[in-house]
Image (cartoon, rainbow, N blue to C red):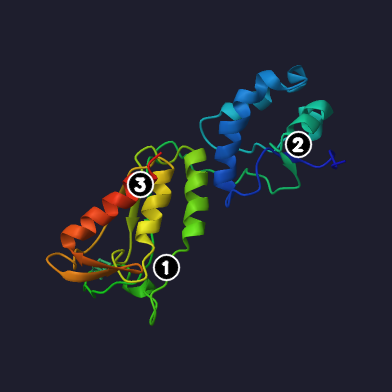
Amino acid sequence: MSDLSSPISPSRPFHATAALRHLAQRRRLAPLRARLPEPEHIPQECWQRFAAAHAEALTLSAAELGEANARWLQAEELIAPGLPPAGEARLPFVFVRAINLELSYSCNLACSHCLQTPLRPQGQPYWLDPSLVRSLLEQAVELDLLGMGLNVTGGETFAAGSPLLEVIEIAAGLGLPVRANTNAWWGLQQNIRLGERLIADDEALGRCCSAAAWAAWP
Ligand code: SF4
């Protein structure tokens, strides 16, 4: 049995930061009030902390929750003992409606005004792993951070080795609209390399991106 004497953070362990854990707690625990075995054991003040508009400590002790409630929440995997408290999370996320995902800092141009020049690695381009992108997007959907969809940006995302088409498919599969930033080097070009594909020309490139989105749209 879990040690119920230690503070309990209502959370799932896969959220990467305290701020995201905090947001997940608020979204997932508040509707559970009516389902708890002993809701009367949780003081009103605790529920006010759940419902607070801005982040504050949501760490509850077993004494505050009541042991039956704590066991039920743990059995539902809605809380886990021993996680760091979310009290340092102070960022309100209500304004987040879309996410900018930088697939790579690499680029085929070298604009003098580029803010990413100091971040750009030398040598082979480095790309975000699509499985990491999927995990990130699934969490962001759960936390309702993607109401306006996903912006994919770089560096330059339309490049050999880029996972852009796969990312479009992943996002579309989650029902998300996707926008991609590009410096448009491929305009009026032929034999364009995107990811592992060789695409005939710029019009075919547009069709390719649309097809990736529509093929995966739920
Ligand atoms: S195209 Fe964009 S990412 Fe590439 S060097 Fe210019 S400003 Fe930077």
Quadrant for ligand 1?
bottom left
Helix, strand, or loop for circle 2?
Answer: helix
Quick one: which residue is furthest to the left in this view? 188
Which amino acid, by three-letter code, is at mark 2? Gln
Tags 2 and 3 touching, CB below 8 Å: no
Task: Report the residue marked by disc 3.
Answer: 215
Image x and y of residue 214, in percent: 32, 45
- The residue under the point 66% across, 22% down is 33
Pointer 1 local density, CA inside 10 Å: few below 14, some 14–19, many at least 20: some
Helix, strand, or loop for circle 1?
Answer: loop
Image x and y of residue 140, in percent: 48, 44
Pointer 3 local density, CA inside 10 Å: few below 14, some 14–19, many at least 20: few
With 56 as the anchor, is 42 left or right in this view?
Answer: right
- The residue under the point 38% across, 75% down is 125
First in residue order: circle 1 vs circle 2:
2
Task: Report the residue marked by disc 2.
Answer: 74
> Which-is-in-front pick, marks 1 and 3?
3
Above or below for 146 versus 47: below
For the residues labelled 1 and 2, the Cα–Cα distance comes to: 37 Å
With 149 as the anchor, is 184 left or right in this view?
Answer: left
For the residues labelled 2 and 3, the Cα–Cα distance comes to: 39 Å
